[in-house]
Image (spheres, rainbow, N blue to C red):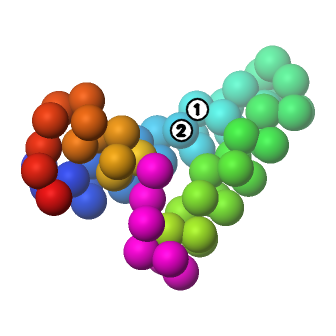
Amino acid sequence: MKREQIIRAIAGTFILISVVLAATVNINWLWFTAFVGANLLQSSITKWCLMDDILRKVFKIKA
């Protein structure tokens, strides 16, 4: 899997988990969904993604 695919999979997983948590535990979990969405939007505009930096550092991948 490429890094971009991994980032999309992580973002999608975070969104699905937070929606389930909002429906079953507490509606405030939707703030996490909004945070992930805002980061995706910011990433599309600035071409910088925090999750990409984290993955590179954790797995010691060069750009």
Name the outermost residue toward the bottom: 45
Instruction: In the rendered view, tell whether residue 7 sits above or below residue 30.
Output: below
Instruction: Determine contact: label 2, label 1, CB under 8 Å.
Output: yes
Residue 4 lies, with reference to residue 9, above or below; the image says below
Q: Amino acid at mark 2?
A: Phe
Q: Depth check: 19 or 8 in front? A: 8
Residue shown at 78%/22% (left/top)? 24
What residue span does the magenta drawing correspond to? 44-50
Q: Which residue is mark 2?
A: 14
Q: Is residue 42 above or below residue 10?
A: below
Residue at 61% across, 51% down: 36
Q: Which mark is residue 57?
A: none
Q: Is residue 22 magenta?
A: no
Local crowd size for mark 1, using a 10 Å CA cut-off: few (<14), some (14–19), many (≥20): some
What is the distance, in whole Å, between disc 2 and disc 1 at their CAs?
5 Å
* Horizontal side, residue 14 vs residue 25: left or right: left
Is residue 9 among what the camera can see?
no
Residue 30, horizontal then vertical, whole percent = 79, 42
Q: Is residue 52 above or below residue 48?
A: above
Q: What label does residue 17 carry, if any?
A: 1
What is the three-letter code of the residue carrying label 1? Ile
Does residue 58 appear to the left or right of 46 in the view shown?
left
